[in-house]
């Protein structure tokens, strides 16, 4: 079974530019979550999709962040315009149901550096 | 605000030693506590604990939860260099759908 795939692995952009991160969940997983780890801090929840619907976006930092999951398959997270404080590692996770545990699988993350 | 605190933040020991990693939490409507191991990239699942006093074991790793005192420990016996990683504690519950993480314990096992 293929795992959760994130693209790119690493992105370096200038302040003010736009970046789009992509997450491909495990096939058949309806639940998709985005998290972010800023240097020196803990991993923080951003938002949760069930299929194509946003169930909880309480962790999104501000309106420069836009997440989509058209068709309920892969998801994108766009940052526009990027600021220096957006630098960090963005993780995606997926699960078949909402119960946490072994089936809640993380991707390897996208490291975003804003310069 | 929901909070997970791990200690120590960093730990260096020699192969063969036993280590205990700590995790305390404050969360409303607690559902479960999870431990993950993060080596280079993706956090990988170790344990999920929902009930107090029941030890979960997997080889040299074991974990237990105390819901009265709001903490969990992760024990690793007879450590090996392959155990070197960041160990993350996370809690499910609270107002948001996602997990609340601690900062992690960076464990280094020296040969």
Image (cartoon, coloured by chain):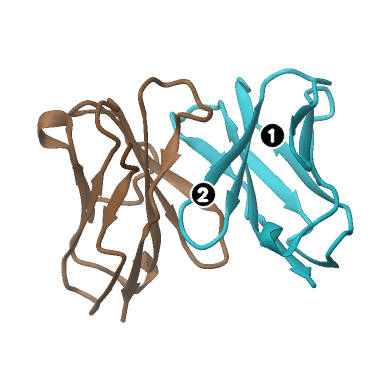
Q: Secondary structure at mark 1?
A: strand
Q: Which residue is mark 1?
A: B26
What chain does badge 2 belong to? B
Distance Cα–Cα, label 2 vs label 1 = 22 Å
Q: Which numbered disc, 2 or 1, marks the residue closer to the eye?
A: 2
* Disc 1: CA contacts within 10 A as few (<14), some (14-19) or many (>=20): some
In the picture, the disc for residue B43 is: 2
Q: Secondary structure at mark 2?
A: loop
Q: Look at 17% across and 34% down and name the residue there.
A: A73
Label 2 vs 1, first from the N-terminus: 1
Q: Point out residue A21 in the picture as x, y percentages from the top left corner.
A: 23, 56
Q: Is residue A53 above or below residue A10?
A: above
- Camera-side residue of B6 and A29: A29
- Camera-side residue of B107 and A41: B107
Q: Look at 70% across and 57% down and name the residue there.
A: B83
- Of the chain colours in the picture, the one used for chain B is cyan
Which chain is brown in the picture?
A: A
- Camera-side residue of B1 and B109: B109
Q: Is residue B57 above or below residue B60?
A: above
Give the residue at the far left of this rendering. Answer: A71
Give the residue at the far right of this rendering. Answer: B17
Q: Look at 69% across and 34% down and name the residue there.
A: B26
Q: Point out residue B79 in the picture as x, y percentages from the top left corner.
A: 80, 56
């Amino acid at each position: 079974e293929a795992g959760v795939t994130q693209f790119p692995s690493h992105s370096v952009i200038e302040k003010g530019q736009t970046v789009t991160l992509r997450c491909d969940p495990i096939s058949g997983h309806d639940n998709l979550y985005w998290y972010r780890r800023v240097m020196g801090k803990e991993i923080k929840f951003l938002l949760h999709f069930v299929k194509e619907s946003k169930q909880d976006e309480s962790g999104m930092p501000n309106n420069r962040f836009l997440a989509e999951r058209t068709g309920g398959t892969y998801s994108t997270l766009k940052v526009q315009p990027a600021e220096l404080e957006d630098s960090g590692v963005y993780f995606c996770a997926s699960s078949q149901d909402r119960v946490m545990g072994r089936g809640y699988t993380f991707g390897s993350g996208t490291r975003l550096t804003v310069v | 605000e929901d909070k997970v605190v791990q200690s120590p933040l960093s730990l260096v020991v020699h192969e063969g030693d036993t280590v205990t990693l700590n995790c305390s939490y404050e969360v409303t409507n607690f559902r479960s506590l999870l431990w993950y191991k993060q080596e280079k990239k993706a956090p990988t699942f170790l344990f999920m604990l929902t009930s107090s006093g029941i030890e979960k074991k997997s080889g040299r790793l074991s974990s237990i939860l105390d819901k009265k005192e709001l903490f969990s420990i992760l024990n690793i016996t007879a450590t090996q260099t392959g155990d070197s990683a960041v160990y993350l504690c996370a809690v499910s519950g609270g107002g948001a759908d996602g997990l609340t993480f601690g900062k992690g314990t960076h464990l280094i096992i020296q040969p």
